[in-house]
């Protein structure tokens, strides 16, 4: 995420502590937060995709997704 967008998220957070945000500011904050979270999740997924477990015999295997029904 661009530094300017992160700065804007922080600016809106400071404003929210000082006063009530306007509906436009609330909508902008929500949009920026969703974008930030989506990028964070993508980065976390990429890290997990490149993570391997090594067992006692030295065998390397990639992480597997848990059963989504659980």
Image (spheres, helix red, strand yellow):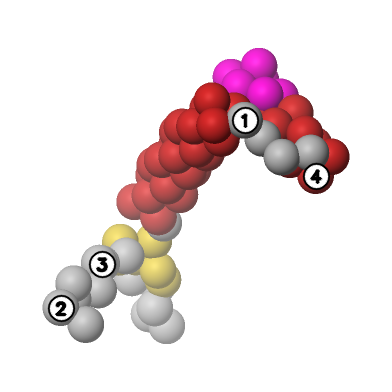
* Residue 15 % position (x, y): 77, 34
- Callout 1: SS: loop
C-alpha separation, residue under disc 1 versus residue under disc 2: 41 Å
Whether 3 is among the magenta residues is yes
Determine whether the residue tagged by mark 3 lies in a helix, strand or loop. Answer: loop
The vertical placement of 66 against 34, above or below, is: below
Nearer to me, 68 or 58: 68
- Choose the circle earlier in sequence order: 4 or 1: 4
Q: Residue at x 42, y 47 (%)?
A: 41
Query: Counting residues from the N terminus, which is met first, the one under dot 2 or under dot 3?
Result: 3
Cα distance between the residues tagged 2 and 4? 40 Å
Provide residue 31's location: percent of width, then percent of height: 46, 32
Which quadrant holds the C terminus?
A: bottom left
First reached walking from the N terminus: tag 1 or tag 3: 1
Residue at the spot of label 4: 17
What element does badge 2 sit on?
A: loop
Of tags 2 and 4, the one toward the viewer is 4
* Nearest to N terminus: mark 2 or mark 4: 4
Give the alpha-carbon distance from disc 1 to disc 3, as whole Å. 44 Å
Number of other residues with Cα within 10 Å of mark 1, as a class: few under 14, some 14 to 19, many 20 or more: few
Label 1 sits on residue: 22
Residue in the picture at 80% in, 44% down: 17
- Magenta stretch encompasses residue 56: no
Task: State the separation of the CA atoms marked 3 and 4.
Answer: 42 Å
Residue that numbered label 2 is attached to? 69
Left or right, 30 with respect to 70, comes to right
- Residue holding disc 3: 64
């Amino acid at each position: 995420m661009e530094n300017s967008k992160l700065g804007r998220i922080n600016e809106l957070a400071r404003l929210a502590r000082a006063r009530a945000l306007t509906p436009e500011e609330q909508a902008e904050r929500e949009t920026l937060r969703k974008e930030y979270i989506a990028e964070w999740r993508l980065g976390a997924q990429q890290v997990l995709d490149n993570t391997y477990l090594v067992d006692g015999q030295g065998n390397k295997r990639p992480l597997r997704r848990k059963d989504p029904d659980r």
